[in-house]
Amino acid sequence: MSSAQVRQVYTTAGFGARLERGKRLAIVVVDFTYGFTDPVYPTASDMTSQVEATRTLLDMARSRNLPVIFTTIAYEKGHVKTLAWLRKATGMASLLLGTRLVEIDGRLGRREDEVLVVKHGASAFFGTDLASHLAALHVDTVVITGATTSGCVRASAVDAVQSGFDVLVPRECVADRASVPHDANLFDIDQKYGDVIGLDDALDYLAGVAIRQA
């Protein structure tokens, strides 16, 4: 089946509608930590272009005083033998609190007032206070960047829309270890959970949103 035929199947089934973008948005940067972005670690790959694209997006968001939230996936040593996910994804057990692997990549320039959510699962929402934090900020639209597209980004996009937020995913700002899962999950997100858009489109959207008052 060609890509055009696949898209037609989804369109016929009623998927892939475009969202009406809200006026109160937040950027959620999922797990762009050294354990994912620095190829010196087995859990990571070279995500330089996606990190740099995300920094461009963040600079625009900061210039308009829009909320920026980071997540890191980090474990205590006691989690290693008790969490079911770590029995399946054993490499993730190296992401221990207090190590460089769980630190936000410095190229993103995280500020002291930008919230850091520590999570133990794939979704930025599962077992965290992210949804309530976004609600307190009266956010209606979440722009998701980060890693990996097929794992924590996709899981976060699913939980974001299920939590009542519209979801945008700039394709240049998300990364994975391989192109096949990356492309497949971008397609899936775009058809079911949010709009996958270009970085330029995202920047134009942010530029058109009113500067948030403190």
Image (cartoon, rainbow, N blue to C red):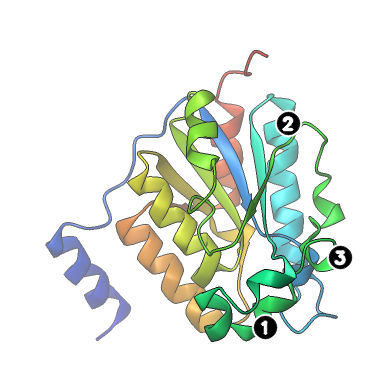
**Residue type, numbered disc 3:** Arg
Please say whether residue 44 is visible from this viewpoint.
Answer: no
Image coordinates of residue 21 in percent, x first then y, are 41, 34
Q: In this image, 147 relative to 129: left or right?
A: right
Q: In this image, 84 relative to 20: left or right?
A: right
Circle 2 packing at 10 Å, graded few (<14), some (14-19), many (20+), is some
Give the label on residue 119, or none.
none
Tag 1 residue: 91
Secondary structure under badge 2?
A: helix
**Residue type, numbered disc 2:** Arg
Which of disc 2 and disc 3 is earlier in sequence? 2
Tag 3 residue: 100
Towards the viewer: 88 or 62: 88
Q: Quadrant of the C terminus?
A: top right
Circle 3 packing at 10 Å, graded few (<14), some (14-19), many (20+), is few
Residues under labels 2 and 1: Cα distance? 34 Å
Secondary structure under badge 1?
A: helix
Q: In this image, 13 relative to 195: left or right?
A: left
Image coordinates of residue 157 in percent, x first then y, are 44, 54
